Image (tube, rainbow, N blue to C red):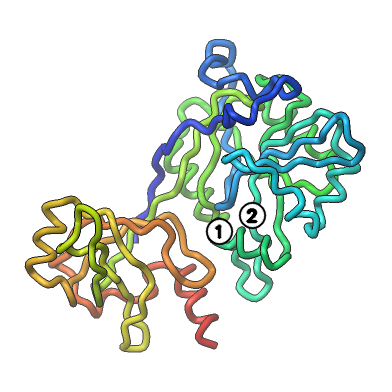
């Protein structure tokens, strides 16, 4: 297994949520880079979850709005969360928090679930944590340390760990080690409260055996759709991923050559709480690897989750 980081995209506030009362949401980080070019860069630890903008309505007593990135207010579905009533009492009117909604840490495994669990937990009224990254009560260029102090006054919300990146740092190596040690999805790189955000995510690879395939649809009718991939556990294959991401040439050749039993390298973001890989993508075939080498100990977290399920 290998691990590295890649820059995914700018981490900006959805423009369709911006209103006259939330003027901070109209500021684009790219428009502010000139003002913050001399500010130090920070990395805030990010867990896998759903982004949420929490807004305290200025006109309605006790009204807390929780906007998803698609613009839907799901506040009524989150009132069972312990932090909800605390935020209603401690947030200022017209204040907005840019947050991540994540599952709480599982007591049995010590693992925090990912984005795939959030909807299930909402529907079943199970606990969720709210981690805040920024607040509209401070200027866009306010330091990350100042933001952390401001968020400390708000009851119920969690604050992300952060580090300051100094000149001369081996940024990729330092962040990769930090994210791995904390078992997080990645980091948000920023120069201030809402200033120059970039999301970095850890990428890992693992060698798996192809034990089945799915049929393609659309323009892939008649070809393989995805590779059903497994690990060897106690001498038996256990399915952990449906792998996509093959280019056309690889897909056509795999469809002609029957890939069952071959070993492939797969890239993924993280391991879900059910022992399945999140966002698995095909990297390459590994003719130098045998199926016996595709063991679960390639990823210690995956090994822990699978064996806890087997108990």
Q: Do residues under tags 2 and 1 come within 8 Å of each other at their CB atoms?
A: yes
Q: Residue, x 70% and y 58% (percent of image)?
A: 128
Q: Residue, x 13% and y 67% (percent of image)?
A: 287
Residue 216 figure quarter: bottom left
Q: Residue, x 80% and y 55% (percent of image)?
A: 79
Question: With 136 as the anchor, is 30 left or right in this view?
Answer: left
Q: Is residue 37 visible?
A: no
Q: Which mark is residue 287?
A: none
Q: Quadrant for the N terminus, please.
A: bottom left
Q: Which mark is residue 102?
A: 2
Foreground pick, 272 / 152: 272
Mark 1, Cα crowd under 10 Å, few <14 / some 14-19 / many 20+, is many
Query: Is 251 above or below relative to 86?
Result: below
Q: Secondary structure at mark 2?
A: strand
Q: Residue, x 16% and y 58% (percent of image)?
A: 251
Distance in Å between CA atoms under marks 2 and 1: 7 Å
Q: Secondary structure at mark 1?
A: loop
Question: With 229 as the anchor, is 57 left or right in this view?
Answer: right
Residue 203, image x, y percentages? 39, 51
Q: Which mark is residue 114?
A: 1
Foreground pick, 75 / 236: 75
Query: Is 138 above or below relative to 49?
Result: above
Residue 71, image x, y percentages? 62, 38
Residue 103, image x, y percentages? 65, 60
Q: Is residue 173 visible?
A: yes
Foreground pick, 18 / 82: 18
Q: Quadrant for the C terminus, please.
A: bottom right
Question: With 232 as the anchor, is 64 left or right in this view?
Answer: right
């Amino acid at each position: 297994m290998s691990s590295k980081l890649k820059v995914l995209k700018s981490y900006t506030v959805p423009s369709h949520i911006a209103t006259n009362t939330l003027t901070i949401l109209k500021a684009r980080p790219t428009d502010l880079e000139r003002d913050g070019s001399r500010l130090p860069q920070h990395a805030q630890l990010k867990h896998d979850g759903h982004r949420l903008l929490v807004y305290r309505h200025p006109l309605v007593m006790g009204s807390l709005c929780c906007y998803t990135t698609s613009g839907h207010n799901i506040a009524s579905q989150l009132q069972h969360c312990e932090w909800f009533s605390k935020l209603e009492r401690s947030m200022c009117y017209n204040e907005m928090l840019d947050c991540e909604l994540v599952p709480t840490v599982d007591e049995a495994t010590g693992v925090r679930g990912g984005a795939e669990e959030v909807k299930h937990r909402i529907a079943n009224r199970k606990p969720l944590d709210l981690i805040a990254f920024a607040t509209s009560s401070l200027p866009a260029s306010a330091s990350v340390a100042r933001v952390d102090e401001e968020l400390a006054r708000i009851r119920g919300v969690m604050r992300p760990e952060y580090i300051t990146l100094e000149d001369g740092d081996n940024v990729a190596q330092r962040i990769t080690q930090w994210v791995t040690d904390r078992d997080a999805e990645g980091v948000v790189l920023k120069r201030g409260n809402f200033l120059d955000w970039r999301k970095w995510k850890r990428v890992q690879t693992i060698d798996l055996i192809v034990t089945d395939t799915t049929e393609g649809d659309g323009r892939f009718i008649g070809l393989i759709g995805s590779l059903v991939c497994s690990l060897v556990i106690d001498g038996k294959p256990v399915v952990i991923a449906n792998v996509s991401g093959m280019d056309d040439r690889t897909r056509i050749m795999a469809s002609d050559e029957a890939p069952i039993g071959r070993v492939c390298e797969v890239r993924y973001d993280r391991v879900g709480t059910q022992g399945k890989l999140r966002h698995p993508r095909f990297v390459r075939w590994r003719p130098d690897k045998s199926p016996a080498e595709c063991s679960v100990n390639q990823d210690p977290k995956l090994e822990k989750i699978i064996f806890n399920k087997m108990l």
